[in-house]
Amino acid sequence: MCYTRDMEQLERIAVRELRNQASRLVRRARAGERLIITVDGIPAAEIGPVRAAERASSLEELITTGSVVAPRVRTPPSQPRPLRAPSSQSSSDILHELRER
């Protein structure tokens, strides 16, 4: 198995310790620490702080983090126009007919 040097420098936490101390470990991760979770001594997962792009909740925040590129043209989309049904009946009439069956 091949491990990166970054993985070796991170603190390793056994999955049992994660179960027993989840709140404390999540607080550490939230504070910026990255932790490797191990199962039988083998790295299985990593927990750490959420990146800014993953926290973003609006287009402006995504643009600020560099996750997306701002649109070149900022024109509002045109309003959709309703299409006429191919028959002479309205959709309400058709639904009413179908429901009575």
Image: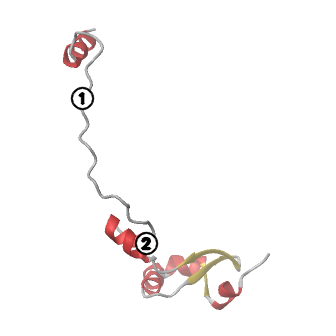
Relative placement, left or right, of 27 versus 77 is right
Scheme by which the image is coloured: secondary structure
Tell me residue 22's x, y (percent): 47, 79
Between tags 2 and 1, which lies in front? 1
Vertical placement of residue 70 versus 92, above or below: below
Q: Nearer the viewer, residue 53 or 82?
A: 82
What mark, if any, has residue 41 been given in the picture?
A: none
Vertical placement of residue 8 versus 97, above or below: below
Which residue has dot 2 on it? Answer: 53
Residue flagged by tag 1: what amino acid is it?
Pro
Tell me residue 20's x, y (percent): 50, 80
Give the class, few, some or many, for how many residues have Cα within 10 Å of label 1's Cα (few <14, many ≥20): few
**Residue appearing at x 37%, y 75% in the figure:** 64
Tell me residue 39's x, y (percent): 67, 74
Relative placement, left or right, of 70 versus 90 is right
**Residue appearing at x 46%, y 80% in the figure:** 49
Residue flagged by tag 2: what amino acid is it?
Ala
Relative placement, left or right, of 17 versus 59 is right
Give the class, few, some or many, for how many residues have Cα within 10 Å of label 2's Cα (few <14, many ≥20): some
**Number of marks:** 2
CA separation, marks 2 and 1?
Answer: 37 Å
- Badge 1 marks a residue whose secondary structure is loop
- Badge 2 marks a residue whose secondary structure is helix
Which residue has dot 1 on it? Answer: 82
Q: Residue furthest bottom?
A: 9
